[in-house]
Each structure stands twice: as C-alpha cells, then as structure tokens.
Amino acid sequence: MIINDITVGYQDTKVIENLTLKVGKAEFCAIIGPNGAGKSTLLKSLIGYIPLQNGKIEIDGKNISEWNKKKLAQRISLIPQDFQLQFDHKVRDLILMGRFPYLGYWESYSKKDYEIIEKIIDQLDLQDMAGKKFSQLSGGERQRVAIARALAQEASTILMDEAFSHLDLNHQIEIMQLLSKINKEQKKRIILVSHNLNLACEYCDRVIMLKKGKLIADGNPNEVVTKENIKKLFGADLLIVKHPISGKPNIIYPESSKE
Ligand code: ADP
C-alpha cells in the first residue's frame, strides 16, 4: 500500500498534510499519537470514506479511487472504533455480512460464503456465541466478532481503530495475540491505531507516530519508541526500559513523587 503525499481533512480544514508512507504486505503496524492527531481520519481515508484533498493512495497497484466500492472492500477492511449496529443481529449473521462485497446484484449468500464464515467461527473459537445476539456479548467478545467479520471480507489489508481501553488487560492481550496470529499465518497487512503503547511495541513490527497530522517517527519499536520521541509525541517525560524477556521498549509511568 502506497500513501503518497496525502492531504485529508473536513470541509476546508486540513487534518493530515503531505503524509507519505509505504506499508508492505504482511506488515503489522501500529499508529500511535495523541487525541486529535488524525489517526482515525487517516484510516477512514484509506478506505476511501473521506476524500483526499491532495495526493493518492494505491492498493494492489491501483489508486483506491479507481476501485469500485465492492472491489475495494475485497482488498481492505476497516474495523471502526465504534463498531455499532443499527439492528441487534445475531453473531453468525453479522459475520456473514463480511461477505457482502462478494455478492452480485440480487444474489444471496452462497454455500461457499457459509463455509467461509463457519471456518472463521471455528478459527476464532466463536462457536459458543455464534447464535447469540451482538448486544449479549462482552466488550472483548464484540471485538473478536468485529475481527471475524473483517476476516470474512477476505481483504489482504485490515485496518483497526482500537477500542481496547474499556477491555480488561487479559482481553487486550488476547486481541493483540489474535491480530498477530492473523498477521503471521495469513500474511495480512494490519494497520492498528493503538492506545496501548507497550502492547503495540510488543506485537507490532513497526510503529508510526503521528501528531497534528504529521509524521514524527516511523520504524521498528526499538528504533522509534525512545524517550525523545515519546516526549515529542505526547509532551510527557516517561522512562523507557527494555522488556526483560522480549527486549522491546516498555514505557514506565513517572513516579508519584515527581511534580
Ligand atoms: P485521532 O483519531 O488521532 O484522535 P481524529 O482523526 O479523530 O484524531 O481527528 C482529527 C481532527 O479532525 C480533530 O481535530 C477532530 O476534531 C477533527 N474531526 C474528526 N472528525 C471530524 C468530522 N467528521 N468533521 C469535522 N472534523 C472532524
């Protein structure tokens, strides 16, 4: 995926200006940055939801504006932060909706579509909840279902606007393990807007730092998650240590006595 000198915003405002990035196949990237940095705006522009004011985005060698909506959805899927539904669907039906980009006009879901989603339900261990309504699920279960739906879309690129903050620690880890497994085994390109920097450092190959719509740093966690860059990004003085086992950067919060 090539993001070439893009400028994106709303009406006449510019949220992202002249951003250039290249994300290879099978990369697992985290986008981090303060609130309002333009992270969600960037993800939405990657699926063509927000038109570009300038520049271009290419996926599979073609400008995203040239793919029709269904063809683009076969290549890239977004799991939004507020994965909400107009109707309280059952989980299996919801996952099946991921197959929509493959339906022709007046076509209904085929045997192949059902086979694909049953396989995903098995892979993600969702059998027990497949017959339940979405509203009956916990936060962690909802995230897994949202991922299952994205997988049903069979796109080579998955974008996820993380909504982990309300999940307990164990579920946050579980979701990162699941994304990492999908990335490694299915060679999918995953771009995750992440608010948990330590988990991002641990699981992602690459960290992209965004502030006020501009790139602050971009590289592997050990290279870019430094005290200086974190200060530049969040304005906070934090201690960065190496994880004792993985050797990845780990951010330590300041001690309470520090003014
Ligand atoms: P982040 O995801 O990094 O928190 P966003 O992409 O959500 O940042 O927002 C970046 C900026 O764009 C913010 O100043 C926000 O107020 C503005 N913004 C987001 N969505 C809209 C919208 N639909 N209309 C106008 N401005 C918006």
Image (tube, rainbow, N blue to C red):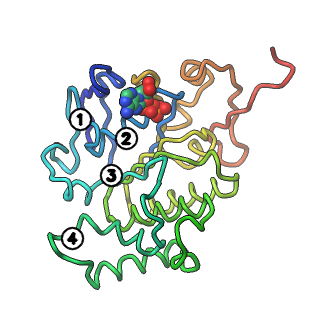
| Mark closer to the chain start, 4 or 3 | 3
| Tag 3: amino acid | Lys
Evaluate whether residue 255 shows in this view: yes
Q: Residue at x 53, y 29 (%)?
A: 35
Residue projecting furthest to the right? 257
Q: Respond yes or no on whether mark 2 lies under 8 Å from ligand 1.
A: yes
Distance between the alpha carbons at the discs numbered 1 and 4 = 25 Å
Q: Residue at x 21, y 70 (%)?
A: 103
- Label 4 CB, ligand 1: below 8 Å? no
Q: Secondary structure at mark 4?
A: loop
Kind of element beneath mark 3: loop
Residue 173: percent from left, percent from top: 64, 55
Residue type at mark 4 is Leu
Q: Which residue is labeled 1 in the image?
A: 51
Q: Which residue is mark 3?
A: 25
Could you give the CA–CA distance between mark 1 and mark 3, rounded to whole angstroms?
24 Å
